[in-house]
């Protein structure tokens, strides 16, 4: 029985797990654990606030036999986990010892829980003494869904704290706007978190997204958080489109900013622009991936990419050929910001149309 599958566990329990006899005592191994939580667990209509730091719950855990009676004869170590959304805090032990069938007042610190989740107890045993795989779930804990900033905010560039989680984005009272469309998804920005940063994401639809256009307001979106070479995506999303807004204002990237990964990470998937840039000679990246480098910092270096960003425009700005401007200046380039760990420079601007590139002097 997989420790991350509470629904499966409950189904098997309801169907009646195979009873296992402890040959040393003749007792039936407990089929489940009763788990109670002291204090507030929120509700669907009034969830607890989302927390990137730990939130402590106090558990009472009791072993229950096949008759539903306290299994006071059971003593041993059981495992603690959080499922399906959340994780134990770094310093939280993932085991607890039951004596005479119970462990009361057990503090368990949980972090980054969201939506409906449970604390999971399981008798996995050890290599020397395999467990019964008896299980038990706490009452459901209801936590608010994370905002785009809470999904993305991290001290580690090129990483997401919710990587791998199936997430419903908190859009309540917020304006989530599509800033650009790609052949395989769209860029989404939370207009309510513009100052704090970390407020945008790429919704990876894997094909041309339907029903959205630049400026569309997304009222609801759900998907799986995935890191693709350090670029945070919301994979295979389902979404609902509302209205539309115009006059999307890009953030200007400066020469001092483009080499600071920690600061650039805050702007990943945002609509950005660079001004008065120098076009570097086209290299292998252009021939292979359609990427061409511009120096944002006048003191930058085309050979190593320092002070520059990659531009990707072949599928969007079809009327512009960077080969005609190598070594020259461009007044402005606008587009959505991406990261790719294997690219050099690692930060890339994906233009949306011919209007996103302005030639100097025109």
Image (tube, rainbow, N blue to C red):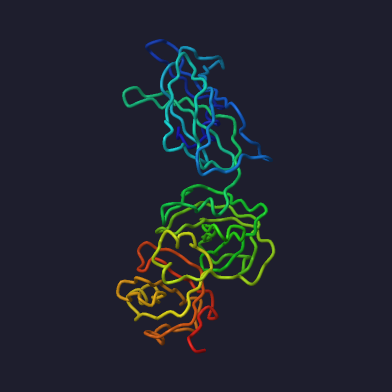
Q: Is residue 30 above or below residue 46?
A: above
In the image shown, does 360 or 236 lie closer to the viewer? 360
Quarter-of-image position of residue 124: top left
Residue extending furthest top? 25
Vertical comparison of 168 with 228: above or below: above
The picture places residue 42, in percent across and down from the top left corner, at 63, 36
Q: Residue at x 63, y 68 (%)?
A: 215
Q: Which residue is farthest bottom?
A: 361
Q: Give how far across and how far down residue 350 sits, in percent.
A: 48, 71
Total labels drawn: 0
Using the image, determine if residue 152 lies above or below residue 179.
above
- Residue 77 on image: x %, y %: 41, 22
Q: Which sits in the foreground, 297 or 171?
A: 297
Q: Quadrant of the N terminus?
A: top left
Instruction: Give 44 or 15, whichever is nearer the viewer.
Output: 44
**Residue at position x 35%, y 64% from top?**
342
Q: Is residue 327 left or right of residue 88?
A: left
Q: Position of residue 46 (x, y in %)?
A: 67, 40
């Amino acid at each position: 029985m997989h420790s991350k599958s509470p629904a499966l566990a409950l189904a098997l329990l309801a169907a009646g797990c195979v009873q296992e006899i402890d040959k040393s005592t003749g007792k039936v191994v407990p089929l489940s654990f009763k788990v109670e939580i002291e204090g507030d667990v929120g509700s669907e209509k009034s969830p607890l606030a989302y927390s990137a730091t730990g939130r402590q719950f106090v558990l009472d855990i009791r072993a229950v036999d096949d008759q539903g009676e306290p299994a006071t004869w059971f003593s041993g170590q059981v495992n603690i986990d959080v499922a399906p959304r959340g994780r134990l805090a770094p310093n939280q032990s993932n085991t607890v010892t039951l004596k005479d069938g119970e462990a009361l007042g057990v503090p368990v610190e949980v972090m980054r829980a969201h939506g409906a989740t449970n604390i999971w107890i399981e008798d996995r045993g050890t290599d020397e003494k395999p467990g019964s795989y008896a299980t038990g779930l706490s009452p459901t804990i209801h936590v608010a869904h994370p905002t785009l900033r809470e999904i993305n905010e991290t001290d580690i560039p090129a990483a997401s704290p919710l990587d791998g989680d199936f997430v419903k984005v908190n859009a309540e009272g917020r304006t989530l706007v599509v800033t650009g469309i790609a052949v395989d998804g769209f860029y989404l920005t939370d207009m309510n978190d513009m100052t704090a940063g970390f407020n945008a994401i790429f919704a990876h639809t894997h094909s041309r997204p339907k029903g959205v256009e630049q400026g569309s307001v997304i009222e609801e979106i759900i998907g799986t958080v995935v890191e693709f070479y350090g670029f945070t995506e919301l994979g295979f999303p389902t979404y609902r489109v509302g209205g539309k807004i115009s006059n999307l204002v890009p953030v200007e990237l400066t020469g001092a900013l483009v080499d600071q990964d920690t600061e650039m990470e805050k702007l990943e998937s945002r609509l950005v622009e660079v001004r008065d840039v120098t076009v570097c000679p086209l290299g292998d990246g252009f021939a292979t991936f359609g990427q061409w480098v511009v120096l944002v910092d006048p003191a930058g270096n085309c050979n190593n990419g320092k002070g520059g960003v990659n531009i990707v425009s072949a599928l969007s700005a079809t009327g512009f050929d960077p080969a005609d401007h190598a070594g020259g200046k461009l007044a402005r380039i606008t587009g959505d910001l991406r990261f790719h760990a294997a690219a050099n420079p690692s930060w890339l601007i994906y233009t949306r149309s011919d209007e996103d590139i302005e030639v100097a002097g025109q």
